[in-house]
Image (cartoon, helix red, strand yellow):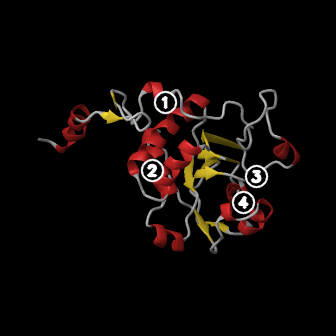
Amino acid sequence: MPRSLLPLLTQFALPHVCLVCGRYTRAKLDCCPECEATLPTLEARCLRCGLGVERSMPMCNACLLAMPSFDQSWPGFERVAMTERWLHQFRREANLTVGRFLSDIYARRLAAMGATRPDLMIPMPMHVIDYCLQGFDHNRWLSKALSKRMDHLPIYPVLKLTRYIKKQHRLPTELRWANVRGAYAIRAMPPSTRYVVLVDDVMSSGHSVNEAARVLKKAGIERVDVWALLRA
């Protein structure tokens, strides 16, 4: 039997199982349509940083007072107990079934939100120490999964960490900016690149992606957006 037929036959022989309700589904992803409609999202959000706002406000007060270096963020899910559990399974346990589920839903939501196609995707970098401890670069895997669903959108991991930084979620908000200031550098950028997106699993305070966007803008990139699975 030709190898090219195996994935097709497997899809028909082994139906997908919804990760929310646990039932078999005819959908082409690990979520039935009924459960997909109930997944948490941010209905009213700041157009810049993605935080929830009143429906009458296009941007939050923080962005109005100090515009971040990135131009727009596109969060996939609100950070609640359910999505936090999925994030832990994907990021810490390298559960690729959950990763595929999240990336499938997120790609559909990006299309529904009207996200424009960038020149390329840049995964937020992981320090070599964290990679050795974790053994899995979740942002690069997520970028590859999204690329497959977006007509092979190019991925260029041009960002690198110049030093080890403390975990942002363990620091008070007022110390997070100093923690990442000057921590990113870029390798050679493909020519004629004008519009890029940073791919991150979760965006909380936004200081990491803001610093990365600042470095990219300084290097001549005209527009930097943020694609993040979860928004705290």
Dot 1 or dot 3: first in sequence order is 1
Q: Where does residue 106 sit, x and y in percent of width and height?
A: 52, 38
Q: Look at mark 2 in the image and give the residue it sits on.
A: 144
Label 4 is placed on what type of residue? Glu
Q: Where does residue 79 sit, x and y in percent of width and height?
A: 62, 44
Q: Look at mark 3 in the image and give the residue it sits on.
A: 69
Q: Secondary structure at mark 2?
A: helix
Relative to the observer, which residue lies in front, 67 or 14? 14
Is there CB contact under 8 Å for labels 1 and 4? no
Write the residue at 61% across / 34% down: 41
Relative to the observer, which residue lies in front, 6 or 21? 21
Is there CB contact under 8 Å for labels 4 and 3? yes
Q: Where does residue 37 sit, x and y in percent of width and height?
A: 52, 26
Label 1 is placed on what type of residue? Glu
Relative to the observer, which residue lies in front, 80 or 224? 80
User: Could you tell me how far apart the alpha carbons at marks 4 and 3 are, in whole angstroms?
Assistant: 7 Å
Dot 4 or dot 3: first in sequence order is 3
Q: Is residue 21 above or below residue 216?
A: above
Is there CB contact under 8 Å for labels 3 and 2? no
Neighbour tally class for label 4: few under 14, some 14-19, many 20 plus, Cα within 10 Å: many
Using the rendered view, name the quadrant where residue 115 is placed.
top right
Q: Look at mark 1 in the image and give the residue it sits on.
A: 36
Q: Is residue 101 above or below residue 136?
A: above
Q: The N terminus lies in which quarter of the figure?
A: top left
| 3 horizontally vs 230: left or right | left
Write the residue at 59% across / 59% down: 189
Label 2 is placed on what type of residue? Lys
Q: Secondary structure at mark 3?
A: loop
Q: Is residue 102 visible?
A: yes
